Amino acid sequence: MPTQIPYNRELEFEYGRVDEITPLIRRVIANNPSAFTFHGTGTYILGRGQVAVVDPGPDLAEHVDALLDAVRGETVTHILVTHTHIDHSPAVPALQAATGAPAYAYGPHGTRPEDGASEGGADFDFSPDHVVGDGDVITGPGWSVEALHTPGHCSNHLCFALREEDALLCGDHVMGWSTSIVSPPDGDMAAYMASLDKVGRFGAGRYFPTHGAPIDAPEPYVKALIAHRHEREDQILAELANGPATIEEMVPRMYADVDPKLYPAAARSVLAHLIHMVETGRVKVDGETGEGSVWRLSNA
């Protein structure tokens, strides 16, 4: 029986409203709903008085205004970016213009071209003021976060662990409402699986994704995500056991319960799985690697 991922798609919110989630975490949701962003980008504010803003979001004037209203009377000292897709980092310049705060991230988006399957594409204009590495700690009055490099969804993805509350701000690496897209060339399935294992071993008590509600029982949730990915690869092996096939042929059968509008995104994740399966010797490809390629079992 397929693994049941315990999604939580319930969320009470209003666009532009600041919600106090915990004593140290507030959230403002941008009005950019889509098939990839769910209700929209949830920008987090950490601390009190001197604060960090995590994932300022899309370059929407009303969202930036809502963020500035939320921190009125306070000082924004840090802008933290989990990764550079266009629903996460484009509002950084506007927020910096208003606050003067430096931006912290793993680095700029590193791979072109971007296929567009992940939230509409990458923000190639972003470059951080401070490059953050795995294990680096960023501090402010009454709060501290440890950065975890979690490539997979994209190569420069970071999660931020808020030490004072045993919380992990996990960007798009783990989402409570859906699985994450892994879209080559910048998305990498082997890296994604390793990063899932990494955050699972890190052991934070509660996750705060950029999209959707908090994840209150992250350990079994992450295990379910890992099991789900293994099952996808088992599906691919079952498909190829019937003979060579293209991704276009496999996706409708593998995702029979999914809206066909999402097939292009599903195809990107299947491609990521297949690349990983070629690397591990289970599958081989005829010619160049791509969505139009013909794939077959290695022993066929």
Image (cartoon, rainbow, N blue to C red):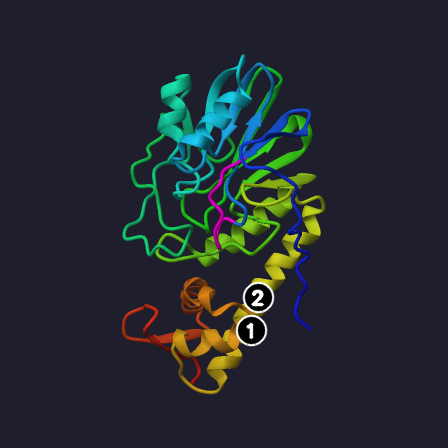
State whether residue 252 is above or below residue 110: below
Q: Which mark is residue 258?
A: none
Q: Which residues are magenta?
A: 29-37
Tell me the quarter of the image containing the C terminus.
bottom left
Gap in angstroms between the C-alphas marked 1 and 2:
6 Å
State whether residue 32 is above or below residue 190: above
Percent x, y of residue 226: 60, 58
Q: Are marks 1 and 2 in contact (CB under 8 Å)?
A: yes
Percent x, y of residue 101: 42, 19
Please name the residue shown 36% across and 49% down the image.
121
**Type of the residue with mark 2:** His
Please name whichever residue, 298 or 124, is drawn nearer the observer in this view of the structure: 124
Percent x, y of residue 111: 31, 48
Element under disc 1: helix
Mark 2: give few (<14), some (14-19) or many (20+) Cα within 10 Å.
some
Residue 129 among those drawn in magenta: no
Please name whichever residue, 25 or 300, is drawn nearer the observer in this view of the structure: 25
Percent x, y of residue 273: 46, 65
Residue 32 among those drawn in magenta: yes
Tell me the quarter of the image containing the N terminus.
bottom right
**Type of the residue with mark 1:** Asp
Q: Which mark is residue 230?
A: 2
Q: Which residue is mark 1?
A: 234
